[in-house]
Amino acid sequence: MPADYTTNQYGDITGTVAATLEKQALKHAQPHLVLSTGAKKMSLPKNDTKVLRCRRPIPFVAATTALTEGIVPNATELRYDQIDIPILQYGAYVTVTDQLVDLHTTPVLGDINKLNAEQAAKTKEALLWGQLRATTNVQYANGVAGVSSVTQPLTLDEQRKAVRTLHRNKAMKFTSIVQGGVKENTFPIEAAFICFAHTDAEAAIRAMDGFVPVARYGSMKPIHAMELGSVDNVRYILSADLYPQLAAGGALGANIGSGSTDVYTSIFVGTEAYACMNLAGKGVYTPVVRSVGNPTDSDPLGQTGSVGWKMYSGELVLNTDWIVAVKHSVVA
């Protein structure tokens, strides 16, 4: 008998099987979650609301008025900025056939579950990338006026300029990282800003004076599987999903592009500059399986089934001053 979809959100599989698939999926998704590394992680609210609610304390100003003997000064007022992030649901599924299940020699369900996990992670990354690349705090390599004039790669000078901006805007360095998976884990790191860059920029980063690859970290541990290394107080994490603006820059020269230079965006961030729902914990990611062999009105012979996923997500920039987007080229 087909599962009762009104009582079982997982389809034709039991909660126990779903929990196993969910655990495998969340574990497999983590290496693909790059931009999420630098986000303030939020948990899915339970039966509460369709928004993630961030409360940010408003810093106190300097107390420059001298105290007067016997006079009680005015109290400092504790105030918060409240930012609401809408929670939206995303999902997709793959159709499978009875012949694929019956005759294929590989474990189809396990393979699809991994691919679904990757798709969910890429979806979250694309949503975050849309938020971060649209930040208004933009720096153009070599000080040019705009995207259409960009022809220079990412350099140490550009990094130091971005870091000066972060310091000037009182951005704080990361001192701990929250990891996802089945459970959330927090571990301390040496104080540093993070830069997210495209994998094409690897050579330019390695060429910077003072570059230290992950292999030479010693007691300092990498914060992500895609971490390349560090320069001064910046740790670089790469992703091939941080797509450039194709042919949007200046004269091509020796750069990657077609006709004109492709313009890449590297994102320098401080802690709590942006937030997202963590892909971790029960209920955030749900596998849904419809088994083959169950006849329905649309499939009288039960020849097809499906393996899908659903995910709740929410993401938003919290403080644009703590994000610097550097637009640059990459030498071919």
Image (cartoon, rainbow, N blue to C red):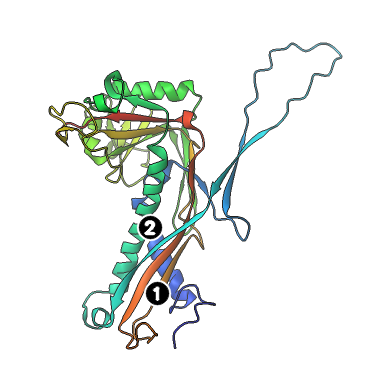
Measure how far apart labels 1 and 2 are at the Cα level: 16 Å
Q: Give residue 294's position: percent from left, percent from top.
A: 38, 86
Amino acid type of the residue tagged 2 in the rendering: Ala
Residue 289 has which mark?
1
Q: Give residue 104's position: percent from left, percent from top.
A: 21, 78
- Neighbor class of circle 2 (other Cα within 10 Å; few <14, some 14-19, many 20+) is many
Q: Give residue 200's position: percent from left, percent from top.
A: 22, 38
Amino acid type of the residue tagged 1 in the rendering: Val
Q: Quadrant of residue 223?
A: top left
| Residue closest to the eye, 179 or 97 | 97
> Mark 2 — residue?
120
> Residue at 47% across / 75% down in the picture?
16
Query: Mark 2 falls on what kind of element?
Result: helix
302 left or right of 199? right
> Residue at 46% across / 35% down in the picture?
174
Q: Give residue 298's position: percent from left, percent from top.
A: 37, 82
Quarter the C terminus occupies: top left
The total of numbered circles placed on residues is: 2
